[in-house]
Amino acid sequence: MLTLSDLPTLNATLNGISFAILLTGYYFIRQGKITAHKTCMLSALAASILFLTSYLVYHYNVGSVRFTKEGWIRPVYFTILISHTILAVTVVPLAVVTLYRAWKEKFTKHVKIARWTLPIWLYVSVTGVIIYLMLYRI
Ligand code: HEM
């Protein structure tokens, strides 16, 4: 049975999965494999939506979790956390527009915005894992 204390690990895992599927989806489009690209990107979206749901459930119940470590790691942690948070908010409208343009088959415009969406989404998912490791594992 999954308990509240399992959610941070689940969340980090979902972020890691998003990161891996986004990279795979990029690889597929570079190979010209459109259906595989589409499947990956929609799966990454599903993983990120699951992450967001589980993240909100966790923080609704637990509140915010304080970073207690001292020394050089503190500014590193907060730099990553702040950039992660700002870009996590930014990536939502970017992903919506990227998907909308793909859905409407406006692929030239899709590529234009996707070249921003993809690296930002990758950064948000990988820093999600890093923040988890810094907060709970080291
Ligand atoms: C938010 C999710 C998505 C992201 C982040 C994304 C990302 C990308 C990126 C970065 C490229 C450019 C690759 C390059 O540098 O050559 C691309 C191209 C493309 N994507 Fe997506 N994609 C997403 C969803 C989709 C979906 C759902 C479809 C549906 C079929 C799709 C269809 C295509 C096609 C056809 C191209 C090639 C366009 C061309 O070269 O003219 N993408 N995508």
Image: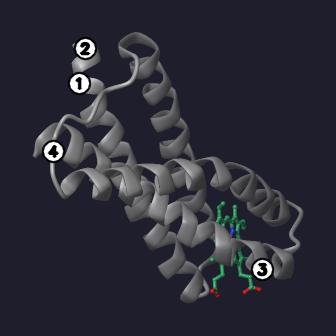
Q: Position of residue 138 (x, y in %)?
A: 10, 46
Q: Which residue is under mark 2?
A: 3
Q: Considering only order in the chain, which callout, 1 or 4, is on the residue closer to the N terminus?
A: 1
Nearer to the camera, 38 or 77: 77
Q: Say whether marks 2 and 3 touch (CB < 8 Å).
A: no
Quarter residue 37 falls in: bottom right
Nearer to the camera, 103 or 16: 16
Tell me the element at label 4: loop
Tell me the element at label 2: loop
Question: From this viewpoint, is residue 7 visible?
Answer: yes
Disc 2 and disc 4: Cα gap in Å? 29 Å
Question: From this viewpoint, is residue 17 visible?
Answer: no
Q: Considering only order in the chain, which callout, 3 or 2, is on the residue closer to the N terminus?
A: 2
Q: Say whether marks 1 and 2 touch (CB < 8 Å).
A: yes
Q: Position of residue 56 (x, y in %)?
A: 49, 24
Q: Amino acid at mark 4?
A: Glu
Residue under the point 58% across and 51% down: 86
Q: Which residue is under mark 4?
A: 70
Instruction: Name the disc covering residue 112, or none.
Output: 3
Q: Considering only order in the chain, which callout, 4 or 2, is on the residue closer to the N terminus?
A: 2
Q: Considering only order in the chain, which callout, 4 or 3, is on the residue closer to the N terminus?
A: 4
Q: Does residue 45 lie above or below 122 as drawn?
A: above
Residue under the point 20% across and 47% down: 133
In the rendered image, the quadrant that contains the N terminus is top left
Disc 1 and disc 3: Cα gap in Å? 39 Å
Position of residue 11 in the picture relative to residue 109 (left or right): left
Q: Nearer the viewer, mark 4 or mark 1?
A: 4
Q: Which residue is under mark 1?
A: 6
Q: Residue furthest bottom?
A: 31
Q: Position of residue 91 (x, y in %)?
A: 64, 55
Position of residue 80 in the picture relative to residue 104 (left or right): left
